[in-house]
Image (cartoon, rainbow, N blue to C red):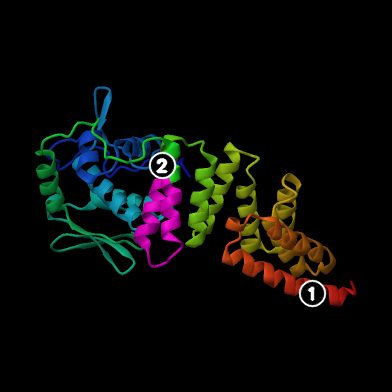
Amino acid sequence: MHVVEANVSICEEPVDDDGVYSFREVSRLFEVPEHRLRYWSQTGFLVPSVRRGERWFYSFRDLIAVKVAKGLLDGGQPLRRVRRQLEALRTTLPRVRTPLHDLRIRCEHDRVVVEDVSHRFEAASGQLVLDFEVSALREHAAEVLALPWVDDDEQVEGEPHTAYEWFSFAQQLEDEWGGAPADTEGLARARHAYEAALELDPRLAAAWTNLGGLLAEIGEIEEAAEHFEEALRHDPDQVQARLNLAELAMLREGPKSAVPAFREVLRRDPDCHEAHYGLARALLRQGGKGEALAHLERFSSAVDRLPHEDQDDGLLARREQARDVIGTLRAELGR
């Protein structure tokens, strides 16, 4: 979802600030690429609140928002949840009369808590991995921005630059992650690389699909579906996105919705073995044994024809299971 409805900045006018900060300075302070900050601003996800002439700058309150957003995204939180947390902070901080430098923002169980010496304010529910004192952020900003500038043209050797390079890098990181639930850092790296590709080219349908698959693996089903739909908006003929939506339909709504979705995939790609497999599963749940048998046979023979390098252990295990079911169905149907 590269379009965010809500504009989120912590304060409409700078209050209790030492000054304002440019995109370049905020990029340097938080080690967030400048193009990502501009993308956040353009899409309304996190907008600087101070305008001077034709240029926009971040207030110190905006820096708090950037730090919170980066911490949550680095921790693997979905954008939708991060938006809610930022909106909660936007409405909470203006009610706090204590000077900003006396505040602490942290997680307490599943709540965002803004604290001063005598009061506690629950910002919103959600899981956060944050605990910082605002005064320390102010000091860190002063220290970092006092350091010598590094030329923007001096880029890290080997760092991706184009959307396709970021996409390829994300695929590599996703392979390294391997779906391990405990490796939240690996997940976050792959996710951010796909997001970087989409920031540079929001029309890159394959990146929308792969990022959606990543989200589906960690249980963010609604957001995954939105990513697959966005992929199809840019490339209506992309089979993988349609196949993934069919799988989600099976998961969320059952065979009644999944059967037509799988049929649509096969209408566009009659040789898609995964669609034959998914449709057979859905038909068996509806009692359509005869048609399910035909699709399982198509699935099994299609896997046999795949190049050896594409026949991973999981796929071969499903082929063997399908063959067992084929034998049972043939016996039941007298074939």
Task: Look at mark 2 in the image and give the residue it sits on.
Answer: 166
Residue 5 position by quadrant: top left
Camera-near label (2 vs 1) is 1
Foreground residue, 96 or 31? 31
Residue 251 in sight in this render: yes
174 drawn magenta:
yes
Please provide the residue range marked out in magenta: 169-196
Position above or below: 153 against 164: above
Q: What's the residue at 57%, 62% (across, down)?
A: 312
Task: Look at mark 1 in the image and give the residue it sits on.
Answer: 327
Q: What's the residue at 24%, 61% (across, down)?
A: 106
Position above or below: 252 against 204: below
Foreground residue, 147 or 134? 147
Relative to residue 330, is residue 242 drawn left or right?
left
Foreground residue, 216 or 87? 216
Relative to residue 165, is residue 318 drawn left or right?
right
Foreground residue, 191 or 123? 191
